[in-house]
Image (cartoon, rainbow, N blue to C red):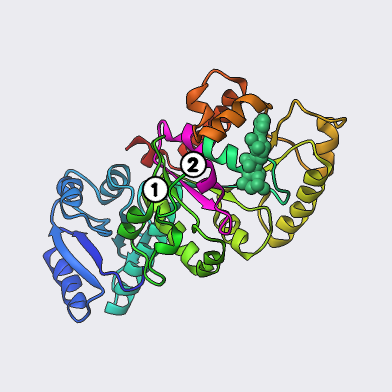
Amino acid sequence: MAGEQIRLLVVEDVPQVASHIRALLQAQSQIKMLDVVTSGDRAVTAASEFKPHVVIVDALLQGRVSGTQVAASLRAAEPQIAVIMLTVPQNPINEDPERGIDAVLKMPFSGFDLTTLVRKAHDEHAVESSRSGSLLVSLFSPKGGVGRTTLAYNLAVALGVSHRVCLIDGSMQFSDLRGLLRVPAVAPSIVDLPTDRIREQDLADVAWRDPSGIDILLAPPRVEMAEMVTVRDVEKALSILRQLYEFVIVDTRAALSDDVLVFLDASDVILEVLTYDSMAIRGLAMAGETFAAIGYPAHKIATVLNRADAAGGFNKEDVEQAIGHGIDFEIVSDGHLVLASNNEGVPFVTSSPEAPISAGVRRIADSLAAHLNERAPALARR
Ligand SMILES: Nc1ncnc2c1ncn2[C@@H]1O[C@H](COP(=O)(O)OP(=O)(O)OP(=O)(O)O)[C@@H](O)[C@H]1O
Ligand SMILES: [Mg+2]
């Protein structure tokens, strides 16, 4: 975000303070002062008109609407805007982002204090609001063939019924989703993104619009092209995708290497997928130790037992003990339906919504949707 000019609106009824701020900002170009609103009751309308990144509100505003009321209404109406409260030492105020107070600026302040705080509030709030407005979910397993691609696609489509969803094909070498969806080899992929400065429009240009209604960021069409995708490009693409979509779902490949860790690190939720298979269970137990060593919190990880009705001599408690935590979701086997749907490239959650396997996927989708709402109540209402 460095380099972007920050748009600032000031809500201030004391003309001298407003001109002081204007004078301090005159000698620099990183912050553009859009306007001064002199009455609290016009603040929200002005914010929707001027589209500022940051608003400075005088806490001691006179008139019908107080400074703290302005901050709270701005947070409710325009949660993406960072709000800085301006006050004097005799009237101390605490930061309270829930009520729209992201930072506090005390008088007197220098030009350096002002520009530093505006940039800091802007950068921190941009990260926070893009995070809270979206959920990045990676489907992971150290063992292949457990159903990640099948579940990722159907989960993305189930979420797509009521959310903006982008599915990322994280198997950079073999592009599982290209195979599943039969997209033409010429369909654009993550390698078509510019290598240094990726912008929103670039992502819109390379996303594949699936007939199911979701957008898909495909992996390259050829194995050797995987090397052209760098960790930095993926990080940048993920941070922009979070601003465009409510859910970013990633189908990862079976490994715990840098190209997979870039997705797992950025994820809010890692959906570990396993089956009743001793190698899948052992692999997840080992991956769990690595996650703990990296410092992933336990709440970041949820476990899906696929083909849960095909126990093959195991029982659920044994598996939970082996992996060191509980199983959160179970998906039944339905070889006939999964094979037919995957071969046609059609999601079973829409072709056979009543099937038990579809109900299982919807339960995961509902739980993730509830999780998103908890994190971003203000954004979810919009
Ligand atoms: N619940 C299920 N019931 C029946 N068959 C399933 C189920 N889930 C997955 N399969 C089948 O298992 C196979 C592997 O599934 P999928 O390709 O989705 O797994 P993966 O973990 O992505 O594998 P890979 O390691 O190849 O990326 C496929 O043939 C798929 O049809
Ligand atoms: Mg796969």
The amino acid type found where label 1 is placed reads Trp
Name above or below for residue 85 compared with residue 155: below
Which residue, given by chain and number where applicable, does mark 2 sit on? 181
Residue drawn at x 77%, y 28% as measured from the top left: 310
Marking on residue 208: 1
Q: CA distance from mark 1 to mark 2?
A: 11 Å
Q: Are marks 1 and 2 in contact (CB under 8 Å)?
A: yes
Q: Which residues are magenta?
A: 155-181
Query: Could you tell which of marks 1 and 2 lies nearer the N-terminus?
Result: 2
Could you tell me which secondary element the residue under label 1 belongs to?
strand
Q: Is mark 1 within 8 Å of ligand 2?
A: no
Residue 171 lies in the magenta-colored region: yes
Quadrant, the N terminus = bottom left
The amino acid type found where label 2 is placed reads Leu
Residue 380 lies in the magenta-colored region: no
Question: Residue 203: where, in percent of width, then height?
Answer: 36, 56
User: In front of the other: label 1 or label 2?
Assistant: 2
